[in-house]
Image (spheres, grey):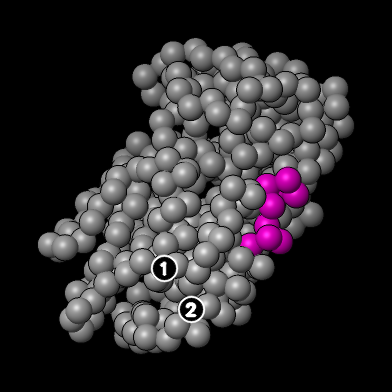
């Protein structure tokens, strides 16, 4: 399609997590000619983005680059803002993607620069965006309630999972409980650590996979922290887990439980964000912060092989309904509509 699309590529600087995964997986599949990915710093990981063009205008602070430089880059076509915020001086049509409002609801669980770069611009950005994408119905309703956004301006474009994340050929499982995500308090890791520590011996290992975030989490002896891992290693961890636990206190979507389900891991997750939308009936769901519920669910799952096998089957089937191809097709359509 002959449409110029410029993408705010700040989320692709550094390791791909969360918004970075969303940006890369959709950008590589957009049905437009060579999208332009612009950023304030070098994007080292360009895997899967070979058909995209890159532009780097170095600047220490990403938010300054967005507000001062990006409007001079995006002069034609349409701009996609995967972070949710837009340059206030922008003069072309735009689509802003909303992932969550945690910097508003939990400002003390984020770095100050994150809070300031989002909170100071989100209101004006939602007013000026031609169209708005939301990764879940829950996030869309928050935009309606808090910012008065008309539902007609919002399109639900969920996260997805690709064919790489798939179940193992055999049914072998290792004796560990797995968490994948940022290592920070907002993710409810204090709940998981307390519950894991209270399990009767001999208890399974606890493996925490992800980059360190804001605030730090005191880790008990015995918990294994892998740091950020590449996709092949991540898939192996998902496939081998006896249980995958995602105890987050607040999410807009929550990609790791969906990836875990796609790989055949039996999942326990909290009812927050889009998780109930894609996991209800295919995972054990508990309320955020409910340690008793988490303890009971984990004991039940660890002790019941038939339940684990059933959740493995249901989870992998459910995950197939959430493809990045569909999400990219929806985004292509939304960008085209915005540009008209």
Q: Is residue 322 magenta?
A: yes
Q: Using the image, determine if residue 246 lies above or below residue 196.
A: above
Residue visible at 34% across and 52% down? 209
Nearest the viewer among 317 and 309 is 309
Left or right of 318 on screen, residue 217: left
- Calculate the distance from the C-alpha at mark 1 to the C-alpha at mark 2: 10 Å
Query: Image quadrant for the C terminus?
Result: top right
Q: Are marks 1 and 2 in contact (CB under 8 Å)?
A: yes
Q: Secondary structure at mark 2?
A: helix
Q: Is residue 171 magenta?
A: no
Query: Image quadrant for the N terminus?
Result: top right
Q: Which residues are magenta?
A: 319-327
Q: Within 10 angstroms of label 1, few (less than 14), some, or many (20 or more) residues?
A: some
Q: Using the image, determine if residue 65 lies above or below residue 253.
A: above
Query: Is residue 213 among the parts visible in the rendering?
Result: no
Q: Which residue is mark 1?
A: 173
Check residue 308 in the rendering and tell me which mark sits there, or answer none: 2
């Amino acid at each position: 399609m002959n449409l110029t699309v410029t993408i705010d590529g700040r989320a692709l600087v550094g390791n791909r997590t969360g918004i970075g995964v969303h940006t890369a997986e959709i950008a590589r599949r957009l049905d437009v000619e060579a999208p332009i990915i612009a950023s304030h710093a070098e994007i080292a990981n360009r895997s899967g983005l070979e058909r995209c063009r890159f532009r780097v205008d170095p600047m220490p602070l990403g938010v300054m680059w967005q507000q001062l430089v990006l409007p001079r880059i995006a002069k034609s076509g349409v701009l996609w803002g995967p972070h949710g915020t837009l340059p206030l001086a922008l003069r072309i049509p735009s689509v802003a993607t909303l992932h969550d409002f945690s910097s508003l609801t939990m400002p003390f669980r984020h770095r100050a620069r994150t809070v300031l770069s989002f909170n100071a611009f989100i209101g004006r950005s939602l007013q000026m965006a031609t169209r708005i994408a939301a990764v879940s119905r829950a996030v869309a309703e928050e935009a309606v309630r808090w910012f008065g956004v008309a539902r007609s301006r919002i399109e639900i474009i969920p996260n997805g999972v690709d064919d790489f994340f798939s179940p193992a050929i055999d049914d072998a499982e290792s004796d560990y409980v797995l968490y994948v995500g940022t290592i920070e308090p907002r993710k409810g890791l204090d709940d998981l650590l307390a519950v894991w520590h209270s399990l009767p011996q001999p208890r399974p290992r606890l493996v925490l996979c992800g980059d360190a975030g804001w605030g730090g989490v005191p880790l008990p002896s015995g918990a294994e922290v892998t740091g950020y891992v590449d996709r092949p290693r991540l898939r192996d961890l998902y496939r081998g887990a006896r249980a995958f636990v995602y105890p987050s206190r607040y999410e807009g979507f929550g990609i790791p439980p969906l990836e875990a389900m796609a790989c055949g891991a039996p999942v326990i997750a909290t009812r927050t964000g889009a998780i109930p939308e894609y996991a209800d009936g295919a995972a054990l769901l508990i309320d955020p912060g409910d340690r008793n519920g988490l303890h009971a669910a984990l004991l039940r799952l660890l002790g019941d092989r038939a339940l684990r096998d059933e959740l493995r089957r249901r989870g992998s089937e459910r995950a197939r309904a959430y493809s990045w191809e569909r999400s990219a097709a929806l985004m292509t359509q939304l960008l085209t509509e915005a540009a008209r």
